[in-house]
Every structure is written in C-alpha cells, then in structure tokens.
Image (cartoon, rainbow, N blue to C red):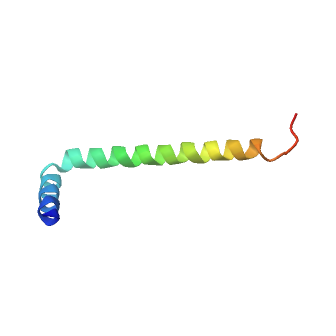
Amino acid sequence: MITSYLKIAFRSLRKNQDCTTIDIGGLAIGMAGRLMIMLWLQNILMIDRYHKKIS
C-alpha cells in the first residue's frame, strides 16, 4: 500500500517539476531561516545567563 502511494507521489512530482522545485526550495529556505532564528535566540539567551549575579 505504501509503495503505491510512493509511486503516485513520485509520478506527480516528476509531472509537475516546476511547482515541485519552487515548493521544495521554499521549504528549504523556510527551514534554514527557522534554524538561523533559533540559533540566534539561543545565543542571546545564553549571553543573558552568563553572569549569575546580574542586577
């Protein structure tokens, strides 16, 4: 059953290559942006915790 779903998915991806490329590119850019924001926030939060006795 899963193999038939995969076959149908790959046929559809091959048939609509332009839309597939745009969709996968947008997904990759979105995931990279999310990762960069998370790393930036982690860095900011670590700086705030560096000194224990901040007034």
Which image quadrant: the N terminus?
A: bottom left
Q: Is residue 35 left or right of residue 23?
A: right
In percent of width and height, residue 49 lies at 77, 45
In the image, is 50 to the left or to the right of 19?
A: right
Q: Quadrant of residue 19?
A: top left
Q: Is residue 50 left or right of residue 21?
A: right
Q: Quadrant of the C terminus?
A: top right
Q: Residue at x 64, y 46 (%)?
A: 42
Q: Residue at x 43, y 47 (%)?
A: 31
Pick out the residue farthest to the bottom: 3
Q: Look at 17% across and 61% down and name the residue there.
A: 6
State the residue in front, 51 or 33.
51
**How many labels sit on residues?**
0
Q: Name the residue nearer the viewer: 17 or 54.
A: 54
The residue at the point 48 percent across, 43 percent down is 33
Residue 21, percent from left and from top = 26, 49
Q: Position of residue 7 (x, y in %)?
A: 13, 62
Residue 18 lies, in percent from the top left, at: 20, 46
Q: Is residue 1 above or below residue 12?
A: below
Residue positioned most to the front: 1
Nearer to the camera, 8 or 27:
8
